[in-house]
Every structure is written in C-alpha cells, then in structure tokens.
Image (cartoon, grey):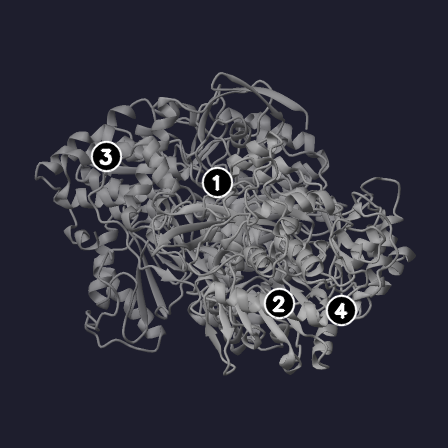
C-alpha cells in the first residue's frame, strides 16, 4: 500500500494507506488506550477506549477500526475524549471489584493504569456489584468473572492465536461470561496465553496467584530451558531466605523471537528449580560405597585427583565425557576443551536428538541457507517435513500459524502421521512411516497437486527434524540447494529437542568433531589447543561398551542422564570412576563416585543457540545456595587437577576492571549496560576465569559460524549463527545417524527435567483426565 | 387473532389485501399479486432501482434510509453470491406491523423479496422472522412453498432464465438481531453480535457476499410501489418521505391498532381521531412516537407534528418503527422509564462496555429510584450514565437505551423529583425491591 | 449424521434436520432454528441435544453453547408442557400486563421461570412479543392470546389443562407449591 500522510494531534504522520490508526499512532509514540485491541488478533471495537475525534465526523471514532487515509486529521487527547474514556471506565468499575490490594494483577493491570490516567475515582452507584464465585478451570488457569471486563482477548488468543478454541463467550448482556470448553474446566494446551493477554486480574495463573506483588519481584529476561525453540521468558524473582527464588515465569518482555508466545513448559515448568529433590551439596562415595555429603573442596579434590590419576596411569583415552543439551554454549565449549586439553581425550559426546552434524556437513560452504526463526516467521512458503511442532515445538507451531494467518504464508506439510498444523496447511502429502527418503522424488516428479504447489514456490523454507539423519539430511539439503537462482530459493531449519541441543553440537560435543563441526582429524585444526588428541574418540554408546569391558577408567557426565534416558546399562559403570554434575540425583548421578550440584539455566549467565541457530544471552535470574554453574565446576576441577586455568579460560586480557554478573549475583540488567559499553569501546572486561563471556570471546574467535553481532546480543536480542561457514570437508569418520534418539517430549514433558516439575506433571494429569472423560462420554 | 382496525383517513396500499385471505396464493393472484415481480423481470435491475429511488420509499425498520439508494450500493459484478435479507425480527416495543403483514399478506413479502433480488442480481433471499412468530413463520413457509409450486420461485422464475430462491429462517429470541449485521451473524449460526462497519453489508454481507437487508414492511411495500408507479406512491407522502406508513398505535387509546396512514400524518390527529383519543377520557401525558427507543414527546410538542422522518427528527425524536405508544396522565413516567430501560438491559448483547454496563446501571438505579429509595444525585447520575452511553456504543442499541432515558429526565424531571420527595407513585410495585 | 444413525430426536425431526443442514450455503446457518426445533421436541437443550446438534452442524459443543446461551427463548432446563410467557413491556404494561402476570402467578402459585409441580405449566415474564396493539398479550408456547383481562386467565389455564389431560378441580387457584423463584427475581 502506498504511504499516506495524515495529522494526529497536530503532528504529521506517514503510514501505508489502510494502516489502523491505533497502530500508526503507537508506532509514532502516541499511545491510544485500548482493552480489546490486541495486535495480531481480530478487531472487536468493543471496549470503546480508543475513541478519537476525526475531523468532519460527527461521532467519536474507534482508532482500532479506523484505517488511515490521505489528509485525515485526528485528535487523540482532548477533554471530550478524556471524558468519554473516563465514562467508560466508570461504567466498568461499577461491577469490577476494587480488590486491587489482593489481586494478582494489581500493579500491572491495564484497568488500574487507565483509571489512574483518566480518573473515575468516584463511584456513582449505590447497588451491590454483581458477584460470582471464582472458578478454577485447570491447575494453570483460574477465572474471576467479576474482574472480567469482557475484552475478548483471551478467547481470540486461544482461538485465533493458538488454534485451540477452548474459550467461549456465553449468555449475553451484563450476564455475559467467558466459559471454558469443558463447562467448568479447561481442556486445552494449558499454554496460559489467556492469562498473559488478560488486561486485568480476571484470568490468573495457578502457579503465581497470591504469591507476591509484581513490584516485589525483579524481572529477568532470559531464555527458556525446555525445548529448542529459544523462547524468551521473563522470570520474576524474589529474595526468600537468602536465595533468589523464581516466583513467576511469563512473557513480559515481548521482544524475544517468541513475541507474545510462551507455552505451558515455559510458563509453568520453572518449578523444578525449587524441587525438594534438587541437589544442594556435593556428594562423594564413601568407603562403605554410599554417597555422602561433602564440602566443595573435598568433592573437587576427590574427583580431580582420581581423574588425574586415571589420565596419568591409563591415558586420556580411558576417560569419557558426556555433555549436556541444556548447558550454555560457553559450558559446552569449555567442557570439550577441558576434555581434549586437560583430560586429553576425544571420548566426548552428548545425547543427540537430531543430526546437526549431518546438516552441517550438507551445508558446508553454503552460506545463508539456514532459516532463523525470524526467517520462518516471514517466509512466504514453508515445507514442513515430519515431526509435530504443536506438541514438540510449540513456538515453531505458533510462528507457522501466525505467518499463515497474518501474512497468508503457504504451509506445505509432508508427514507420516496426521498433525494439527494441517489445519493451516495449503497442501498435505502423506508419507509412509519410512517414506521420508522418497519425498524429494515425489516433488521432482511434479505430478501431484502437492508437488506442483511446492515446486511452483520461488522461495521456500524447508523444516525437518530427526526423521532425516545422515545421508538422508544430505540428500534433502542437496535437493534443496538445486532449487533456482533466487538467493532465497531455499533455506533450511532442522529441529532438535532441547534448549541447547544445537549449542552442544555446534560446540563440538562429538568424539570426531571439534567446535563448528571441524573434524578432529583435520590437519591444523584448533592448533592452539595444547595436546589435542588426533584420533576420533568414542561415542556415547561406545563409552558404555568400553566401560562394560573395563576399558573406561573414568566418566564425567555433565547435565545428562544416559542411564535414565538413553537406556545405557548401569552395570557397565561398575568399574568406572563416575563424576556427575547435575541438578538432581538422576539414575546416572546415583551411580557416581562424586556428584556436584549444578545450577540450572535460570541460575547462570552465558549464551544458548536455538535449533534454528539463533544465539541468545542467558541471564542469571535465580540464585540458590550450594549450587554452582557447570562452568565454574569445570574451571575448579581443572584448577584442582593442576591445569593451566588461564589457557582454559582466556580471562583478564587488557586488565579492565569489571565483572559481568556471573560472580556478583543476579544483577543482570546492570551487567548488560557495562557490557554494551565495554564491547562498544572494544575493551576487554573479563576479570576472572569464572566469567563465561571470556569463553564466548574464544568461541567467536575459533568457531566457524560464530561471528556474532555482539552489541545486539548484549542488548538482549537474538543474533544468528552461520552453519554454512565451515568449508567443505570430507565426511567425518563416523556416521552419527544411528546415534539419534529424539525425546518426543509432549507439551508437558521435558526429558529428565520435566520429572521434577510438579506443575507440568499436574497439567499432564489434568489433561489426561480430560481425555479420559471425553472418551468415556 | 389480532384485531384489524380501520379508519377513513387510511390510505390502504400495503394493507389493501389485509383481511381478504391473501395468504392463499390464488386469492393473492386474484388481488393482482405477482404482477409487479413479472413486470420487474421484464424491466431489469436499473429500472427497478430507479423506480425505488423515485418512490422516495425509506426504510421502515427505523433508520429511514432510502431504499433505492441502499440497493444501488450493491456492486453489479461480484465474485461472491449476492443476497437479499428480509428483516422480520420485529422486536422494538410498540411495534407489531410486520406481524400483520406476515399474517395477512405473506406473498407481498415474497414478491418484494423477488423484486429486490432482481434489482441487485441475487439468486437467494432469506426471510428472517423472530422466533416468537412461529405461527407466522408457518404461514410464510406455506406461502413460499406455494410460490415454488407455481414457479414464482426456483431455477426459472415465471418461466424465465432467472433463478431466485427463498429460505425462511427463525430467530430464537434476541432484539439485537434486528440490527442488520447482527441479523447476518444470527443467520450464519452465530451469536447475534453486530459486525464492525465498514465494510457495509451492501459490499460485504452475508457469507461475505454483497447483501441488502430490508425491513419486512419495506419489502412488502415494494410490489405496491411497482404496481402503482413510483411517482404515484411518492405523491402520497411528504417530500423525501414517500408513501404510507403502518403506524401501530398502542397504549392508552380507545382504538389501538395498526393503521396505514400517509407519511406526514398529524400525530395529534392520529391519537385523537384515528385511534379514538385517550382511553376513558383521560388526559394525554406523553407519546413515544416510533417505538420504545424514540424520545418521548409532550402533548404540546405534537400539536402540529407530521409523522415523517424529517418532521419527527426536527421535534427531537424519531419516527423509528412507527410504533406510537400513548401514555395517559395516570401513568408513572418513572415506571415507564424503568420498564423501557429494563428492556434494553435485557437485550443488550453485551459486546461493548458502555451498553452492557450502562444499561445495567440504569436499570438498577431506576429500579431503586422507582421503589422510593432514590437519592438526590440519582437523577443526575442517570443522565450522566445515559450520556456515557450515547454515541459511544458499538451499535445503535446503546443510543436506543440512552435517548429515551435522557428524554424522560429532561421532560419529566419534576416527576422524578417528586419521587424523591417521598411521593412514590401510587402504582409503584414495591416488591421489585426484592429483586434489587 | 443421518436420520438412520442414533439420534435423540424423533425420526421426523431428524429427517427435518438432515434437510435443514443441506438447505443453506453454509451448514452452520441451520444452528439457531435447529436449536429451537430441538427444544420444541425435547423440552429444553439438554447436554445430549447440544452434543447432537454440534455433531450435525460440525462445530464444537462449546460453539453451540456460545450461540445457544445468547438467545432468550432457548433454555437449558425443562419448562412446563405449556410455557406461559407474559409480556410486560411498555404497551402491555400500560394496558395491565402486570395484572395479567400477577393473576397467572396467583393461579399457578409460581413466579418468573417457575414450573408447577405437575410440570404442566411454567411461567415467564417476557419482553415485547410483537402484539402491542392487542395488549395485553401473552404467548403459551407459540400461541398468542391477546386483549387479555385478569379474569380471562383461569379459563385459559383450564383450556390448556384439559389439553394436557389434567382437568382442573374447578377451583380457580390451583394452589400448587411454587418451585420457581420469587416474582421479578
């Protein structure tokens, strides 16, 4: 649409013709109040708060339905308009309970803010307010009808946004009420988006209600620790008994790649942090064979001396290291560097959920062919192959739905099962369960409506997951790379499972690949690593096999549970010295000789990379006595082993005195401003070996594809990494295709972590009941 | 059976077949039925629309929009089917004219619908009756079936190549569905909540297709306009207000009933002459001239008031649906106002805040006030609430509640004050307090 | 769903519904009349009615309830065999609508939305029913009775009682225990 110029409050504004006045004004910094208007959702014109005066129009007009045209003149604030808005608030407050002092929304309530702005401090009514009892719809969602102002944000978010349609409006007039699909209970994805968009305290969260006041929390914007989509979450943190405790997780900061969105796991699944089963003290196996609490010094000494002894007596090749899908890039990088340069072993691996290595191999030398989530959000056409994003990648599903709904993107789905996103699809191609390999030939034959439609697309994002492995990934990518001359002819995204699965792969938690998928066998690779073993090491199953044969002297497991989750044989570790860093005494940790209580992703700083290659800053929100970030545990372990810590973590260069948060507690916001300034000045603030950003410097320097937009990153934005940066290399020594074990987490499960979330288990129980009940009908 | 009335001043155009068994299709044909539709089929859309424009026929639902103009807004070419929608959701208190049309002359509605369809190039019309009018729906359904049987409806109407179908539809109790976009929502199987305008129905209406929506009386008038010629029809009324109007006179008159009178007919004469004057020789206290949503008029305001859209508008009220409600001097105006606002509170769809909350607070305040528990500030508060509704709601229902309220306060403030001063009216129904 | 499969409606009504959904350009247009016709037969919109209507139209039960609860003629609890709807809106009120309502309350011993204990009658105060010029008026189910006077009330009740197969005992006041709420509740 062509731009038009119009006048608002005497200011000339320009916007494309047809832009909604409310949007045009907000973009120009003119705030127009509204309850029912919500960007991206259908228009209602119901709350009448956005009324403005348009020249030559007799009645006040709603800015949310007025499309701007050339030459229009508007006034958005005047005594007349203020009076109208005040009048509407007066009417609302007639029935709205003034229980603000005990309302969860108090302090972040749009009705409160509007009342503050426009007045309506006096009640004109003598009659009693309409009262109705509060209802609990699910463990996550409570509804308080008297507080509800019927803005219909929740019903639209649930229906249009989530495609769940679990909320309705029933009755009419002043008796109108929001009603869940189960009559008195809510049978849905429990995403809590309805709570998030509620402008007042009508919908409240089961996990947050009556816990605290919003202003008593510090709000820390970080990245969700559950799936690999990389949602930004805002953690509300409060000091309780010396700990910084997470009280709430929501989506206050809408600047993340997830925009408005957060799923049940992101919103409610943070309570594992406070689980009673959380480890808070190191443990060492005593002479009687029992794990008993120890001091950090004792445990570090016990682990370090044994690791050192085994390295020196049996060689690094007899030590294995298993890394994590949920630790930061810095920790993963440090872990493999520690393995390779301190333990002198290439026996390093992680639980692989998708074949990132094959993807990197296939894309080697082809830059700009991966799709970030923002690329997907703006793509005109998407081919989604396999998987079920609605369950396993809720943000991806949201982005796809939104792109189809608002931008009329065309979604094509090829799948061996029927998935919910078909409701948004333009065409669907069914495939037999093992038929994914045939997809490209189906498309090339171009004789079905599906194939014709896909092939006719000039620009296509291809999204796939663990249905493609090894050669399958390479074939799919090779097929795509042949598409047309358009630089955007194809982009790819590969989906893996956990919050930093991509980072684990990118940072080289592989026996045969260094960070950036550089083969360990490549001459001159990572030459500055002292004593880098030349030969590829053992994979995760190979390590357990070796252990079973008595060939693995020690195993260091960081944030992983191969015994509980990958089905590895516990008995194999009988004669292996096992060191585990974890949050919980998992099946694997229970076998360890030394256990270190680790911090969760919400208790540390660093970066993680989403499965789409979007790198984001993780900020420390919570603080818990007794635990340490894996980063610090590794540094202390290395130090205890007598390693050159400065070679491991290149800190302290330049001698600038600043400290970026990690060692100073949860002052993340403050640290950022320092970091932005220092980075902008080209200064090096790394003060101690415990600062993970010191390792980020090295990552950026050594890892192909991790050339980062530092300022943007430190400002809290997502920045992209480049998988095609590595030059074409021969296939790595081992094909990882057989090592992929997708987690297939549902909306309420999150591998080992999910087991310790009471909230998620409760939601799962609620939904299981809903399914059973409707089946019994 | 509703009583039919008659008066020499009546100009029987729309009602000319009333009481003559015209619900029977043969009788309707004997009385000249379906000739207008045939003529329109020959003359074509442009001619029809010109005739409608020339007739000065204005919408009988209440807003008084020029019918020919409305039809001309429908785009000639449309990728989506076009529809005709007949609004027989007659629900405005004081209004029962469509009731008689459906009862006595259902074919005139069918014929008018066909003509409207021909005018805009539609192949499908809907006749929507309020749910309470079940016996009338059955009469209309029978008439539609007969029209199909005679080939007046169907794939080839009157033996031509032109198709036109009619579907009858029942509501289920909702005044708000009388609003044209809410009517479309209801017809699409949804809550009767109005749509955002623009787009207007003539461009994006039922099922997204261009749609004209006309009141049943308007549609029933159309065949008569064609039959007598636009100019003759226009000549009956006043300038810009063509033809006659079915005035439903109810309340405290000797001879209540639906009378067809020329537009511009004097209101005082209508009450005292046509309807036989105020019942029992009592004095006139007030008149609601066009259904419950129109502001009340005082006896002195109706002396020279001609009942057409423009003159009543000038007098500070509206011609509305033509439902004239006559109030005698023994009536408590506070109770009358309470009953009026109770209706709008009951019928508010609840979509927008000012109407939903405003009508409820008005009802609550009026209830308490009428029961003798008013306070000095209530009168101003009622005015204040009504002002907060007026012009600020999503659809006209808010105004329909606010305008009469403001009228009652403005014109009967003294009576409200008397209530305050311990003089509750003799008719106060104190048990209402139990509900407060 | 076709009329042959399990339906809670009579075969005739089920067949009518089959025809109804086929009639419109969009199936859902059948919803409001279908609910009303279903209520006419079953007496009210039970959970089973809602479920079957949802299935016939192809929408969720929540959707059906959202719509059904909007319309004031639709109810979710049984009414009497004869539902007496007394208009008290302005035109009827001016001509004694409330006296008619009072008389029905007295005769039936129930108030607004009440049902007589034998289930024959229910009483409702309703908004304008479009009989303003023949006020005061009521509807019994769909039948209009206009130009009423309180003294005509017992006769009307007797007529329906006879139709229901429950001839009255001749006394004007049926004296049955009220189940409904207080008047004007």
Tell me the subunit letter for badge 3.
B
Q: Depth check: A689 or B247 in front? A: A689
Helix, strand or loop at disc 1? helix
> Rounded to the nearest whole Å, what is the CA distance between mark 4 and mark 1?
42 Å
Evaluate if marks 1 and 3 touch, with contact meaning CB atoms under 8 Å apart. Answer: no
Q: Among all residues in the image, which is located at the extreme left? A: B422
| Mark 3 neighbour density, 10 Å: few (under 14) some (14–19) many (20 or more) | some
Q: Disc 4 vs disc 1: which is toward the camera?
A: 4
> Rounded to the nearest whole Å, what is the CA distance between mark 2 and mark 1?
32 Å
Q: Which residue is mark 2?
A: A557
Query: Is A275 rendered above or below residue B98?
Result: below
Q: Quadrant of residue A637?
A: bottom right
In the rendering, at what x and y percent does residue A502 appear?
Answer: 68, 55
Evaluate if marks 2 and 3 touch, with contact meaning CB atoms under 8 Å apart. Answer: no
Marking on residue A669: 1
Identify the mark nearer the N-term, 4 or 2.
4
Marking on residue A90: none
Tell me the subunit letter for badge 1.
A
The reply to whether residue B144 is visible in this rendering is yes
Identify the mark nearer the N-term, 2 or 1.
2
> Rounded to the nearest whole Å, what is the CA distance between mark 4 and mark 2?
14 Å
- Exactly how many numbered labels are in the figure? 4
Q: Quadrant of residue C167?
A: bottom left
Q: Which residue is mark 3?
A: B381
Q: Which residue is mark 4?
A: A538
Q: Disc 1 vs disc 3: which is toward the camera?
A: 1
Tell me the subunit letter for badge 2.
A
Whether labels 2 and 1 belong to a single chain: the reply is: yes
Left/right of residue A457 with respect to residue C3 in the rendered view: right
Q: Residue at x 74, y 44 (%)?
A: A380
Helix, strand or loop at disc 4? loop
């Amino acid at each position: 649409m062509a731009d038009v110029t119009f006048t608002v409050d005497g200011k000339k504004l320009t916007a494309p013709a047809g832009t909604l006045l409310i949007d045009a004004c907000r973009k120009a910094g003119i705030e127009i109040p509204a309850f029912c208007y919500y960007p991206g959702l259908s228009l209602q014109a119901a709350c009448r708060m956005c009324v403005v005066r348009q020249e030559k129009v007799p009645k006040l007009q709603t800015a949310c339905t007025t499309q701007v045209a050339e030459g229009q003149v508007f006034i958005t604030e005047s005594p007349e308009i203020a009076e109208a808005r005040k009048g509407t608030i007066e009417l609302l407050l007639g029935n709205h309970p003034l229980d603000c002092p005990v309302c969860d929304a108090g302090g972040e309530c749009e009705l409160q803010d509007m009342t503050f702005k426009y007045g309506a401090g006096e009640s004109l009514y003598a009659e009693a307010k309409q009262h109705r009892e509060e209802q609990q719809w699910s463990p996550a969602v409570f509804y308080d009808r008297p507080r509800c102002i019927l803005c219909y944000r929740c019903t639209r978010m649930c229906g249009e946004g989530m495609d769940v349609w679990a909320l309705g409006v029933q009755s009419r007039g002043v008796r109108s009420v929001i009603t869940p699909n189960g009559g008195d209970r809510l049978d849905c994805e429990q995403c809590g988006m309805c709570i998030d968009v509620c402008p007042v305290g009508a919908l409240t969260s089961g996990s947050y209600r009556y816990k605290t006041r919003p202003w008593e929390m510090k709000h820390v914007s970080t990245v969700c620790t559950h799936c690999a989509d990389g949602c930004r979450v805002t953690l509300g943190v409060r000091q309780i008994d010396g700990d910084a405790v997470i009280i709430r997780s929501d989506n206050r900061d809408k600047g993340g790649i997830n925009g408005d969105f957060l799923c049940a796991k992101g919103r409610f699944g943070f309570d594992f942090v406070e689980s009673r089963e959380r480890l808070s003290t190191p443990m060492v196996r005593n002479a009687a064979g029992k794990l008993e609490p120890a001091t950090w010094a004792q445990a570090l000494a016990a682990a370090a001396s044994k690791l050192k002894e085994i390295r020196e007596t049996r060689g690094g090749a007899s030590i294995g290291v298993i890394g994590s899908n949920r630790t930061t890039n810095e920790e993963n990088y440090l872990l493999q560097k520690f393995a390779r340069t301190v333990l002198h072993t290439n026996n390093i691996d992680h639980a692989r959920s998708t074949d990132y290595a094959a993807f990197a191999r296939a894309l080697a030398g082809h830059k700009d062919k991966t799709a970030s989530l923002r690329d997907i959000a703006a793509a005109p056409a998407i081919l989604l192959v396999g998987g079920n994003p609605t369950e396993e990648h809720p943000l991806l599903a949201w982005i796809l739905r939104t792109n189809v709904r608002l931008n009329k993107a065309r979604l094509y789905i090829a799948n061996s099962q029927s998935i919910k996103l078909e409701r948004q699809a333009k065409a669907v191609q069914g495939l037999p369960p093992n038929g994914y390999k045939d997809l490209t030939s189906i498309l090339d034959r171009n004789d079905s409506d599906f194939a014709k439609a896909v092939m006719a697309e000039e620009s296509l994002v291809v999204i796939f997951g663990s249905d493609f492995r090894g050669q399958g990934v390479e074939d799919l990518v090779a097929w795509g790379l042949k598409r047309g001359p358009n630089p955007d002819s194809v982009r790819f995204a590969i989906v893996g499972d956990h919050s930093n699965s991509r980072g684990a792969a990118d940072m080289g938690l592989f026996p045969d690949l260094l960070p950036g998928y550089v083969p360990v066998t490549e001459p001159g690779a990572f030459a500055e690593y002292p004593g880098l073993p030349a030969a590829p090491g053992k994979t995760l199953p190979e390590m357990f096999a070796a252990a079973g044969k008595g060939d693995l002297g020690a195993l260091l497991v960081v944030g992983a549970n191969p015994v509980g989750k990958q089905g590895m044989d516990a008995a194999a570790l009988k004669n292996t010295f096992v060191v585990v860093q974890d949050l919980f005494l998992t099946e694997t940790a229970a076998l360890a000789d030394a256990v270190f209580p680790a911090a969760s992703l919400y208790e540390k700083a660093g970066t993680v990379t989403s499965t789409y290659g979007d790198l984001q800053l993780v900020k420390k929100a919570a603080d818990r006595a007794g635990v340490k970030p894996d980063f610090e545990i590794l540094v202390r372990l290395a130090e205890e082993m007598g390693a050159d810590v400065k070679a491991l973590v290149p800190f302290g260069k330049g001698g600038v005195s600043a400290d970026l948060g990690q060692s100073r507690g949860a002052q993340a916001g403050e640290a950022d401003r320092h970091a932005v300034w220092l980075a902008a000045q080209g200064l090096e603030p790394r003060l101690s070996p415990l600062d993970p950003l010191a390792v980020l410097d090295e990552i950026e320097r050594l890892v192909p594809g991790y050339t980062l937009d530092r300022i943007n990153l430190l400002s809290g934005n997502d920045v992209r990494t480049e998988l095609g940066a590595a030059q074409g290399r021969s296939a790595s020594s081992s094909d990882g295709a057989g090592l992929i074990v997708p987690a297939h987490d549902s909306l309420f499960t999150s591998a080992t972590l999910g087991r310790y979330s009471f909230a998620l288990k409760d939601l799962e129980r609620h939904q299981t009941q809903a399914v059973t009940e409707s089946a019994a009908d | 059976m509703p009583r039919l009335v008659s008066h020499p001043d009546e100009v029987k155009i729309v009602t000319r077949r009333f009481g003559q068994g015209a619900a029977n299709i043969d009788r309707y044909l004997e009385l000249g039925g379906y000739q207008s539709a045939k003529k329109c089929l020959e003359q074509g859309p442009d001619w029809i629309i010109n005739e409608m424009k020339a007739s000065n026929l204005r919408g009988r639902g209440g807003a008084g929009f020029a019918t020919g103009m409305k039809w001309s807004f429908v785009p000639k070419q449309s990728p989506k089917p076009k529809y005709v929608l007949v609004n027989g959701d007659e629900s405005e208190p004081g209004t029962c004219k469509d009731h008689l049309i459906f009862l006595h002359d259902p074919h005139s509605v069918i014929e008018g619908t066909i003509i409207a369809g021909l005018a805009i190039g539609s192949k499908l019309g809907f006749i929507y009756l309020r749910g309470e009018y079940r016996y009338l729906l059955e009469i209309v359904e029978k008439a539609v079936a007969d029209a199909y049987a005679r080939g007046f409806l169907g794939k080839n109407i009157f033996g031509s190549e032109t198709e036109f179908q009619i579907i009858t539809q029942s509501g289920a109790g909702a005044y708000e569905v009388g609003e044209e976009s809410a009517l479309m929502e209801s017809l699409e199987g949804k809550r009767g909540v109005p749509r955002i305008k623009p787009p207007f129905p003539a461009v994006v209406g039922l099922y997204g297709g261009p749609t004209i929506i006309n009141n049943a009386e308007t549609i029933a008038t159309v065949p008569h306009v064609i039959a007598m010629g636009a100019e003759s029809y226009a000549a009956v009324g006043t300038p810009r207000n063509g033809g006659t109007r079915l005035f439903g006179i109810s309340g405290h008159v000797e001879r209540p009933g639906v009378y067809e009178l020329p537009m511009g007919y004097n209101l005082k004469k209508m009450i005292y002459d046509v309807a036989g004057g105020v019942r029992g020789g009592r004095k006139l206290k007030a008149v609601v001239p066009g259904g419950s949503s129109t502001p009340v008029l005082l006896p002195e305001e109706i002396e020279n008031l001609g009942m057409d859209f423009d003159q009543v508008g000038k007098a500070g009220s509206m011609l509305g649906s033509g439902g004239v409600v006559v109030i005698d001097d023994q009536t408590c105006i506070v109770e009358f106002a309470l009953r009026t606002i109770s209706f709008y509170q009951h019928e508010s769809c609840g979509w927008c805040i000012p109407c939903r909350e405003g009508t409820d607070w008005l009802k609550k305040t009026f209830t308490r006030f009428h029961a003798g528990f008013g306070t000095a500030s209530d009168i101003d508060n009622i005015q204040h609430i009504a002002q907060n509704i007026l012009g600020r709601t999503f659809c006209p229902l808010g105004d329909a509640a606010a305008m009469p309220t403001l009228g009652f306060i403005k014109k009967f403030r003294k009576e409200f004050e008397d209530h305050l001063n311990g003089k509750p009216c003799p008719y106060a129904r104190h048990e209402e307090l139990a509900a407060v | 769903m076709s009329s042959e499969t399990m339906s809670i409606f009579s075969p005739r009504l089920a067949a009518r519904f089959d025809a109804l959904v086929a009639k419109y350009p969009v199936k859902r247009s059948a919803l409001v009349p279908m609910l009303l016709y279903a209520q006419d037969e079953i007496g009210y919109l039970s959970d089973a009615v809602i479920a079957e209507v949802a299935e016939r139209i192809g929408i969720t039960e929540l959707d059906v309830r959202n719509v059904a609860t909007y319309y004031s003629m639709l109810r979710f609890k049984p009414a009497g065999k004869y539902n007496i709807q007394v208009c008290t809106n302005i035109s009827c009120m001016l001509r004694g609508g409330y006296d008619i309502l009072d008389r029905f309350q007295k005769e039936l011993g129930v108030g607004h939305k009440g049902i007589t204990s034998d289930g024959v009658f229910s009483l409702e105060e309703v908004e304008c029913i479009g009989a303003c010029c023949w006020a005061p008026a009521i509807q019994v189910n769909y039948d209009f009775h206009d130009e009423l006077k309180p003294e005509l009330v017992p006769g009307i009740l007797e007529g329906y009682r006879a139709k229901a197969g429950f001839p009255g005992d001749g006394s004007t006041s049926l004296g049955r225990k009220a189940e409904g709420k207080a008047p004007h509740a």
